[in-house]
Amino acid sequence: MNAPSARTNTLDLIGNTPLVLLEGPSSAAGCEIWGKCEFANPGASVKDRAALWIVRDAENRGTLKPGGTIVEGTAGNTGIGLALVANALGYKTVIVMPETQSREKMDTLRALGAELVLVPAAPFSNPGHFVHTSRRLAEETEGAVWANQFDNIANRKAHIESTAPELWEQLEGRIDGFTCAAGTGGTIAGVGLGLKAFDEDIRIALTDPHGAALYSYYACGELKAEGTSVAEGIGQGRITANLEGAPIETQFRISDEEGLNWVSRLLREEGLCLGLSSGINVAGAVELGRQLVAEGRERPRVATILCDTGFRYLSSLYNADWLKSKGLPVFPWLT
């Protein structure tokens, strides 16, 4: 077995994450389900990629100067990635986050030296929404740039240039489908565009949680939300700049209960401790795999994103009282 190559720069640790065959999901789908282990990034999430590309883009455009400040509104993981990248390059970070996000994300951001600003959860139409608050703070802060992950297409460029080629190489040019949820839309749009450049026949599917509006948009052209979800960092009610032109060909709506089932199974059966967004992605990958099998494709291969570590949700997803308070099933080993 070849050892991973040595890196001469800590930022080179971002990306080139492992890909693993998921046995339980593969058995359920009747095909191969592969998970991209984005929790292996330095900030333990897929958002490290977007963070690095956004910062490098700002440097290249000359808007981020030495000693400057990066301001962003985030559910947490992008902020963590930005804080790490900023530390490595000598920048400061100000992170605006809804106060409903996990305590672990808040504690992590503070530990990384970011200035954390918490705001009440609010709809995007509200001026107090965390995205709008972060934009105003960037405008008011001397030497600051606004990362703007939702509409900054450097986000999806990260996945066009890194995630998609990695998947293509790791699966030796044989991949039939890819699916994941959308938060900013950068991952699904970027990976989708990148994989389509290799093979137009790869099926790109959206996996949407309840409470988001994109399932309805891609199914019938109307942005319409149904239900709710406790998943952090995914679910979107508008077409962001990153989602514009995304080659999404089919869509699945996945409940928190379905996602939690896979979170539970992957931990107990395969030793992977993941967040709910990963469980929802895996549930969508199983649905996509079954769809491709029903169409007669021979042993199709489907890839998805294992977004972040479950250790980021010990006070919520892995807490029996919290699960009960949300009306969600409690993992048997927590009772």
Image: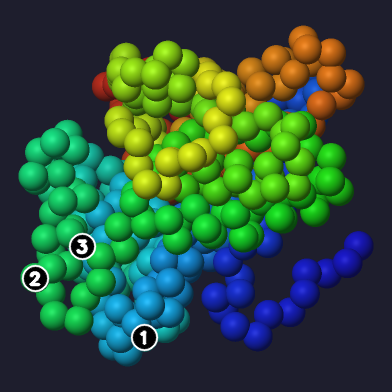
Residue 223 visible at all: yes
Q: Residue at x 52, y 43 (%)?
A: 189
What element does badge 2 sit on?
helix
Residue that label 2 marks: 140
| Residue 12 location (% of width, % of height) | 61, 74
Q: CA distance from mark 3 to mark 2?
A: 16 Å
Q: As shown in the figure, which amino acid type bears the numbered disc 2?
A: Glu
Give the color scheme: rainbow, by chain, secondary structure or one colour: rainbow
Q: Quadrant of residue 211?
A: top left
User: Disc 1 vs disc 3: Cβ atoms closer than 8 Å?
Assistant: no
| Residue 329 location (% of width, % of height) | 43, 17
User: Disc 1 vs disc 2: Cβ atoms closer than 8 Å?
Assistant: no
User: Disc 3 vs disc 2: Cβ atoms closer than 8 Å?
Assistant: no
User: In the picture shown, does residue 106 fall above or below 247?
Assistant: below
| Residue 116: assigned label | 3
Q: CA distance from mark 1 to mark 2?
A: 21 Å
Q: As shown in the figure, which amino acid type bears the numbered disc 1?
A: Gly
Q: Which numbered disc, 1 or 3, marks the residue closer to the eye?
A: 1
Q: Residue at x 15, y 44 (%)?
A: 129
Q: Quadrant of residue 233?
A: top left
Q: Please tell me which of labels 3 and 2 falls first in the chain.
A: 3
Residues 1 and 14: in front is 14
Residues 51 and 222: in front is 222
| Residue 168 location (% of width, % of height) | 76, 49
Label 1: few (<14), some (14–19) or many (≥20) C-alpha neighbours in 10 Å: few
